[in-house]
Structures are given as structure tokens and as C-alpha cells.
Image (cartoon, rainbow, N blue to C red):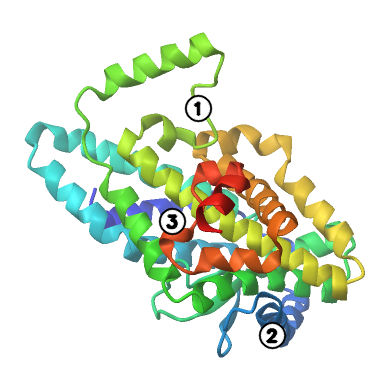
Amino acid sequence: MTLDDQWAFAGRVAGLVARDYPLAQSYHLDHLSTEMDGIVRRANDMVAESTGLAVPGMPQVAIVDRRQWVERNLASFSRLIGPAEQRLAERLDVMGDESTAHDLARRMMATETGVVLGFLSRKVLGQYELVIPNDTEADSIAFIGANVLHIERAHQLRPADFRLWIALHEAAHRAQFVGVGWMREYFFGLVEELVASARPEPGRLRRLVREAYAAMRQGSPMIDERGLLGLLGSPHQREALDRVQALMCLLEGHGHVVMDRLGDRTIRTQRRMSALLKARRRDPRTAMFFRLTGMEMKIRQYEMGERFVLAVERRSGWRTLDLAWTAPEALPTLDEVEEPERWLARVG
């Protein structure tokens, strides 16, 4: 299986999982498409004033269906991790007898990628796309129209309130990547390091058995919130994954607090929407899926990051968080996200 075949196979799997939403092609979608440009512009201005981060210009705004969202992400993934994955493939190809195992591993990875993206395409509301650049390198925000309409209809939300509220979250992420000059390249570097570290590891089976036995003795789960990557990854991969998780905790926590603060000042139904979204993330029907795929850590990023941001604000004020944007070395580690006092002692 070539890299192109791998991404195509993942797309077919995702399409089967994504399914359609009845209102996805109705006049409601046309109305959503018409007004989101203005809503994003308003959200962009509000976030810039609140955070103090420079966010020049306006992003492109796209209303997409679930399959289009999957295709955009697969195209972005192939560009983002393709070079590192190609180097890994070249190293494995010289191993001869291992090529069959490598082909099987690619098929398994494509299947998991497709299942995860297909599942998320039914959950995600919006996505800032400079984080994972699309084919045109455009600074853009995409909203999955079917999901936005479904949440509004199922929970009888005021569309104007809900659309501004979710736009605030994506505008906050845009401010983090546009307003912090080094953030984009730093993020890409972390992802490339994580992929490049996925090399054959001698004695991996023995290590897994040893770690599984130790976890059993301690009463700990074999698969933690980092998912199968955390279980199967080498120690170096886990270190890289922890740095990615620490960054995402900060970005998600900061974005979530900004969204809620601005919403609380301008949107009457903000608190109900916030409670609804938190309950949606904790849906027990998807708990095992999240654990196996590592998405449980994604859910925890919101909670850990929000606790970190609020703790720093209580101790030293909101503007102290600006220290995190000064340099990669000033970002909190995963341990510091758990214990904000340690980050304040180091950078403050």
C-alpha cells in the first residue's frame, strides 16, 4: 500500500462512518453560509481586543459537509506528516521481509484514521485550518454546517447566539497562531518529530509485556488517555506526545476561557450552551472509543487547560498568560499544566 493508497482508503472508511444529516442540503444551510462571514468578522474583532494579540485581516470562511471536512483534513494530514512518513517508509523498505508487516501496519493506520475522522465529522462544529494547512495555505475557518444545524435544532438554541459563540472559539485559535509569530512553525515541528520518531524498536514486545504487567500490579489501565499510541509508542515518542499535549492543553484552555468570557458579556444564553457542550464531551457512549483512539486526552485538554489558565489568572492576573507567548521555552510542560505554580515559578 502506497501513501496515496493509504489516504484514499482512510477517506473511504471515514465516509462510511460519517453518514449524512437530513437538513444538510436545505435552505437552512444557505442561510448559515450567508451570515457566517459577518459573524466571524465580529468574533475576530472581539478576540483581538480581549487577548491583545494582533490578528490582521480576515480568514476565509467555509461551510462544509462531513465528507468535505474529512477530505480537507486528509489533504492536510498528507501534507503535514507525509514527508516524515515517507522517510520512515524508506527505512522500513530496506528491511525486506518486514515489508508485508509494514503494509499491514499502513492499512491498520488508514483504518483507524478513517474511523476517527468519520466519527469526529459527526461531532466537530468548527475548525481553524491554519493549524493543519489546506492545499491553498489559506488562513481559513471551516464549519460543518450539518452539525451546527443539528445542535441548534436538537437543543432549541438561538442560532445567532450559538453561531457567534462557536465562532469565538475558532477566532481565539486563529489569534494564537496568527498573533504569536513562532507558534505555527513550532507546532509543525512537534508533529514532524512525533511522526519521525515512529521507527522500529528492538525488543518492543518484551517492553510492552513488562509495562502491562507493571500496570496490572499497580491497578492502572493498560491503555491510558493517550490511547494506543501511548501504549505502543517508544519512550521518545511518549516524550514528544507529552509536549504536543501540553501545548494543546494551553491552546484549548485559553481558547475556551476566551470564548466563555466574551460570550458571558455579550450572549444571554452562553452559560446554557457551555454546560451543553461540556456534557456532550462527557457522553459515556463514546468513552471507550475515545480511550482506544487517544481522544480521551483531547477531551481532557479542555479541562486541564481551563484549570491552568484560571489558576494562573487567580494568582497573577490575566496578562501573566502573555508570558507563554514569548518563546517556545516559556510554554508550560505537561507537569506544569497540572501544577501551575511550577510554571509561574519558572517564568514569572
Q: Which residue is mark 1?
A: 223
Q: Tell me: 41 left or right of 343.
A: right
Residue 309 lies in quadrant: bottom right
Q: Which residue is mark 2?
A: 45
In terms of depth relative to the viewer, which is nearer, 322 or 125?
Answer: 322
Residue 112 lies in quadrant: top left
Q: Residue furthest bottom?
A: 57
Q: CA distance from mark 3 to mark 1?
A: 26 Å
Rendering coords of residue 327 (x, y %): 43, 66
Q: For label 1, count other residues whose C-alpha is less than 10 Å away and answer few (under 14), some (14-19) or many (20+).
A: some
Rendering coords of residue 68 (x, y %): 52, 67
- For discs 2 and 3, the disc positioned in front in the rendered view: 2
Q: Residue at x 69, y 59 (%)?
A: 316
Ranked by sequence position, the earlier of labels 3 and 1 is 3
The disc at residue 11 is 3
Q: For label 2, count other residues whose C-alpha is less than 10 Å away and answer few (under 14), some (14-19) or many (20+).
A: some
Quick check: 94 above or below 302?
above
Ranked by sequence position, the earlier of labels 2 and 3 is 3
Rendering coords of residue 235 (x, y %): 33, 34
In terms of depth relative to the viewer, which is nearer, 83 or 310?
Answer: 310
In terms of secondary structure, where does tag 2 sit? helix
Looking at the rendered structure, the kind of residue marked 3 is: Gly
Q: Tell me: 238 left or right of 95.
A: right
Q: Tell me: 265 left or right of 198.
A: right
Q: Residue at x 73, y 67 (%)?
A: 259
Looking at the rendered structure, the kind of residue marked 2 is: Asp
Q: CA distance from mark 2 to mark 1?
A: 42 Å
In terms of secondary structure, where does tag 3 sit? helix
